[in-house]
Amino acid sequence: MSTVTTLEAALDDGAADRTLGELARDIPGATAVFLRHRLDFCCGGSATLRDAAQARGLDAGAVCAELAALRPPPEAPLPEQPADLVQLIVTRFHDVHRRELPELVRLADKVERVHRGHPEVPAGLAEHLRGMQQELLEHMEKEESILFPMMARSPQMQLRPPIQRMREEHVDHGEALQRLEALTHELHEPADACNTWASLYVGLRKLHDDLMQHIHIENNVLFPRFE
């Protein structure tokens, strides 16, 4: 399958002819791609990706392919074998959290700085995201270095104590999501939000949904097999 065909399937046939602002608002992680290629999605957000790429001597199709790669594939049935389920959790959730959270922190920093006088600015959001990022990194490292290898090696092993600790940390993550919602007016940006602000909230909504699904699969599908 060609790059163009893959792009069309993932981005509804017209990404190159949509504006940078639209793409930044609609695709979590697009802002990082645009920053890497020095495409101005904020003040220059009214330009189409095709025109902006041409102005910088870039291949619009290649940039579109990077955007297409940001979207996860359709959800497939969960694997039956613990080792396969563990691998899915790592690639679908752990790796995605590691990739997306730094950009969300950067966007939150910018929104708080530029719009500090706005009545709906999410004051304290960047700091909260940094805390979430650190806690998630530590949690995922414990799972990947200790718990998951034990599960993969011994599918019949009883692992109640370490699993209980992970469940407790999941409660902490859930409370962090509640705090995230409180800071952001339930993840709804104001009507006059700029492209950066709108992009931030698109990414936050994805983080919220991904983390909820992540915790659900571990708590309700994986962990009971070892308790």
Image (cartoon, grey):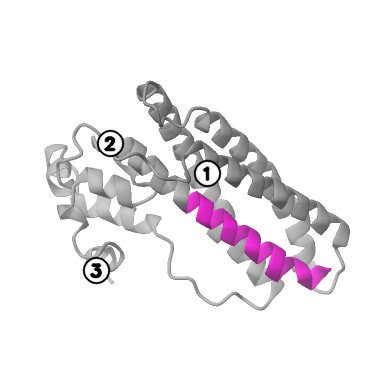
Q: Quadrant of residue 167?
A: bottom right
Front-most of residues 180 and 214: 180
Task: Decide: few, some or many residues near mark 1? Use Cα within 10 Å; few <14, some 14-19, many ≥20.
Answer: some
Q: Which residue is mark 3?
A: 5
- Kindly check if marks 3 and 2 are in contact, taking CB atoms under 8 A apart as contact: no
Q: Position of residue 85 (x, y in %)?
A: 64, 69
- Circle 2 SS class: loop
Mark 3 / mark 1, whichever is N-terminal: 3
Q: What kind of secondary structure does the magenta stretch mostly adopt?
A: helix
- Residue for badge 2: 192
Q: Image height check: is 117 above or below 68?
A: above
Q: Position of residue 53 (x, y in %)?
A: 17, 43
- On residue 125, which mark appears? none
Image mark for residue 181: 1
- Pick the quarter of the image with the N terminus: bottom left
Q: Position of residue 149 (x, y in %)?
A: 75, 60
Q: Nearer the viewer, residue 198 or 63?
A: 198
Q: Is residue 101 magenta?
A: no
Q: Amino acid at mark 3?
A: Thr
Identified by mark 2, the residue type is: Asp
For the record, the magenta segment spans 206-227
- For residue 28, say whether it is visible: yes
Q: Amino acid at mark 1?
A: Glu
